[in-house]
Amino acid sequence: QPTRLADYQPYPFRIEKTDLTFRLDPKATRVLSRIRFHPNPARPGRHDLRMDGERLRLIAARIDGAPVTARPDETGLTIPADALPDGAFDFEAEVEIDPSANTALEGLYMSGGMYCTQCEAEGFRRITFYPDRPDVMAPFHVRIESDMPVLLSNGNPVAQGEGWAEWDDPWPKPSYLFALVAGDLVAVRDSFTTRSGRKVDLAIWVRAGDEDRCAYAMDSLKRAMKWDEDVYGREYDLDVFNIVAVDDFNMGAMENKGLNIFNSKLVLASPETATDADFERIESVIAHEYFHNWTGNRITCRDWFQLCLKEGLTVFRDQEFTKDMRSAPVKRIEDVLMLRARQFREDMGPLAHPVRPESYIEINNFYTATVYEKGAELIGMLKLLVGDEGYRRALDLYFERHDGQAATIEDWLKVFEDATGRDLAQFKRWYTDAGTPRLKVEEDWQPGDQGGTYTLTFTQHTPPTPGQDEKPPRVIPIAVGLLNPNGDEILPTTVLEMTEERQSFSFPGLATRPVPSILRGFSAPVVLERESSFDERTFLLAHDTDPFNRWEAGRSLARDVLLSMIRDDAAPSEPHAQALARLVTDDTLDPAFRALCLRLPSEDDLAQALADAGTTPEPERIHTVREGLATYLARQLQKDLVRIYEEMETPPPYSPDAASAGRRALRLAALGYLNRIDHGARAASLFASADNMTESAAALACLIDGGRGAREIAAFYERWKDNRLVIDKWFALQVAHAQPDMAAQVAARLAEHPDFEWKNPNRFRALMGALAANHAGFHHISGAAYRFYADWLIRLDPVNPQTTARMSAAFETWTRYDAERRAMIRAELGRIRQTPDLSRDTFEMVSRILAAE
Ligand code: ARG
Ligand code: ZN
């Protein structure tokens, strides 16, 4: 029953117009539809009219006004070709649905007393019978009848009265971009005038009481609208732009045309309730959804295999936006950290799949780090290969050529070929081939009379992934720079284009053997395998002009120190501590950058690195050693860290801007170390005095890390018990920072708490996600966490398959571990798979994970 890319066929009908009327009722909503179909010339001949539809009670159906007797099956409705007129016709239906019973949060559901929708990818079929596929686009007219005070849908408002409202969306769209909201909401309003003079009314709709936490989201929206005009020449195209915050949401947010729906945690923020990281994330997701208006909505995807067409590109665009709003090097490092932690992990395990997959059972399982984040990396590589100018020309052509269409990756690559004259046949492998390439580097130095020649030889190899054994070489843009041993740069960043399996690049005429800086800016999503000396890394850490590689040098130093401590019982390295001290005390460097340099590789990163090198990771040992190094560094750097902690204090009032956030990040990184040797003194006093969530949460985390904080945990709860988003943090912090042997117990105790509303995805993820992220706790040899986690997945599955399936990926790394842990995880996965009536979402995930052995 998998759906395959190779089986794509155009839909046999086009839609001229879709009219919908909603008579809202919590238990029995009526949806009346009138759809004007035309035969699609791309599919000549006569065809049955097949529409998708799930869990719909069909009341009546008509063709051109005449009743038809049609009996729906499990997945839809078929009207045989011989019951259809020759040319165009109107299909009408009346169906009944039950939003209050919709706990899966797909289609029309209720959240906190309001009606809302989530249709991507295939939720519209739970609203009415429809060709629920992205290549069928139509203008929508929507009438909502309800006694709710606020009634919203896509497009522009056209009419309203007591108990009803009508909306018209002139831009043809697929059903996945449909949205409806009805509730008792208040608006925070503003406006934006596009560069061609259209005045757009902006509104963020929230529940009364939340209005004072919308300012940052609104400001982000206006900056995003301006940025898309300035950088991509893209203007907004409706009179209104609405954003609604909802508490029950499976993902982050959704780009429905003119009516974005957001997880409330990505809208609501105030200094007291949101951290610097929350503010940054809000800014980027608001921008992401807004940018979809062009990359996703005006140009959409032909089918769901092309998901990266909109997601990879839109993530790339939101990353560029954040770079322009904040610090570009810091954002690049954060993005690479995330890519390695999530996408490399995925790519090296049983869930590996190409950026453009070839088959799926449940498409919701492919909203992954590979499609999104690696998809964005591919855009970055393309841009590097064709240059900024070429990229701009290609994008202009893309918007011109494909506006109003449902496009493919082939279309996307073709605009680059046409705009730049470059052949991208080999580049396309990045879309079709899964797996992270390994790049080996050898160097050669030949002194000579006319100066010496330095040669870099690269070898690429991509290990097999499920269903793909052979991986032909890809084109890899390798940004390199060369430095003189005195620290001067003798070759500024140059992009080498590797196209062969093994390839050399020579640099003649050099006075001395240079020190190379390879893969600057992380110019390709590959694993660089290069032996390099301790001295060379400390040299790069001190002198590299590329900030990413400067950070990377420090990162790899720390990683190697940790690996040899874990594997060979080595002592911590004093030269490493000294190099780190020099860097973090360098006041010429951005504090945010220095904060990143202080962060040690995570336990999961180390487990991956060990497994990669053929050593079975031992979670307790990794934890103990990493803690040991952190405490050692705290002692070695104590004086510097104390000075940083004092100097980086930000004067009130709190401001979420990047510079202040960077100072706080450095200060709190210092606190994380000092907390190991000051018996919680600083953390306790910071917790008592903090006027913002960034510091409160960090201080509380430190206290829990140190086995303290019972009083503070209680105080935090008392203060915030009426704020769901803050209480999510309260759950997450306690589990994420629990000692490894206590993590499952802490999680189990919190799962009994009256506030553990497990049907709310944010709450479920706060507790369970924190447990999965507590590496040594999750993988504790007792197996208690595995069991507890699996129990909860089994419980959640019938309620919310999508979130269950997504969270089952916590087990994706299981083959890394020892036989005892593997046996326990295998048993849990088997138990989940055998659960009666398991959703196909979770079934697909668990089956793929289990297939790894
Ligand atoms: N298109 C949304 C975004 O990335 C994601 C929505 C995905 N939702 C889902 N149920 N698969 O902006
Ligand atoms: Zn998106």
Image: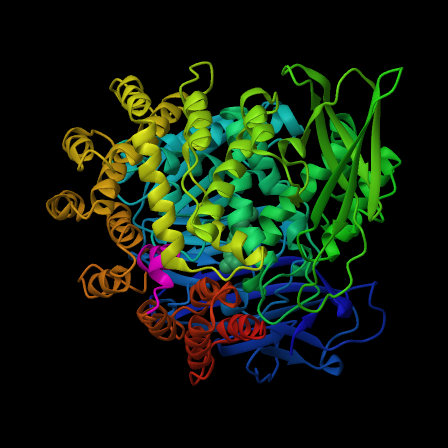
Picture quadrant of residue 755: bottom left
Q: Nearer the viewer, residue 238 or 523?
A: 523
**Start-end of magenta stretch:** 765-781
Rendering coords of residue 189 (x, y %)? 38, 32
Q: Nearer the viewer, residue 652 or 204?
A: 652
Residue 338 relative to residue 751: left or right? right
| Residue 420 included in the magenta stretch of the image | no
Instruction: Name the residue located 39 percent from the left edge and 75 percent from the top edge.
Output: 798
Instruction: Name the residue located 61 percent from the left edge and 39 percent from the top edge.
Output: 316
Residue 802 relative to residue 677: left or right? right
Residue 355, above or below 448: below
Rendering coords of residue 773 (x, y %)? 39, 55
The C terminus: image quadrant = bottom right
Instruction: Name the residue located 58 percent from the left edge and 38 percent from the top edge.
Output: 291
The N terminus: image quadrant = bottom right
Q: Nearer the viewer, residue 827 or 662?
A: 827
Rendering coords of residue 640 (x, y %)? 33, 21
Magenta stretch, main secondary structure, is: helix
Residue 99, above or below 288: below
Instruction: Name the residue located 27 percent from the left edge and 49 percent from the top edge.
Output: 733
Q: Nearer the viewer, residue 61 or 471?
A: 471
Q: From this viewpoint, is residue 385 visible?
A: yes
Rendering coords of residue 292 (x, y %)? 58, 43
